[in-house]
Image (cartoon, helix red, strand yellow):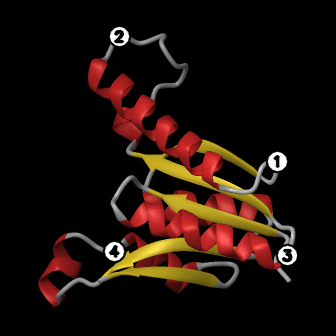
Amino acid sequence: MFERILVAIDGAPQSQRIVALAAEMAEVGAPHLEVVCVVDRAFALPQPDVLDYPPAEHEQHEAQALVEAAIAQLPAGRATGRVLAGDPARTILREAERLGCDLIVIGHRHLGRIERLLDPSVGQRVIERAPCPVLVEVRG
């Protein structure tokens, strides 16, 4: 089945369902789960606690807390995680390729035509370009 699953979260309420879905997938086999949370490059700290920029520190700490909380909900010893910086879709796709993932678990929100023009969906971009299957938790 799947040996390596990338679980992409962003702190939205849907993230809990994404983690639960990944946990269900882990019950089917014995995959390694890699949890990622991507922060905007403007809020990324090259070395934690080196730069005194409170908004970036807050963003980094929040993202790290999300990753740690997700790992705590997944099967012990089978999940690791990282906070990454960059464009969310590109960063998720690059990490999936780098890790050789068999599956990406991600959320997706339905957007209207104008919303898609103003704020393209990360989930849609990942679905379109993924190097592997994508399991989507759809926000209702």
Q: Gap between marks 2 and 4, in whole Å?
A: 32 Å
Q: Secondary structure at mark 2?
A: loop
**Earlier residue among tags 1 and 2:** 2
**Earlier residue among tags 2 and 4:** 2
The residue at 54%/61% (across/down) is 8
The residue pinned by badge 3 equals 29
The residue pinned by badge 4 equals 121
Front residue of 8/126: it is 8
Question: The N terminus is located in which quarter?
Answer: bottom right
- Mark 4: amino acid: Ser
The residue pinned by badge 2 equals 52
- Mark 2: amino acid: Asp
- Mark 1: amino acid: Gly
* For discs 1 and 2, the disc positioned in front in the rendered view: 1
- Neighbours of disc 3 within 10 Å: few (<14), some (14-19), many (20+): few
Q: Gap between marks 4 and 3, in whole Å?
A: 30 Å
Q: Gap between marks 1 and 2, in whole Å?
A: 34 Å
Q: Secondary structure at mark 3?
A: loop
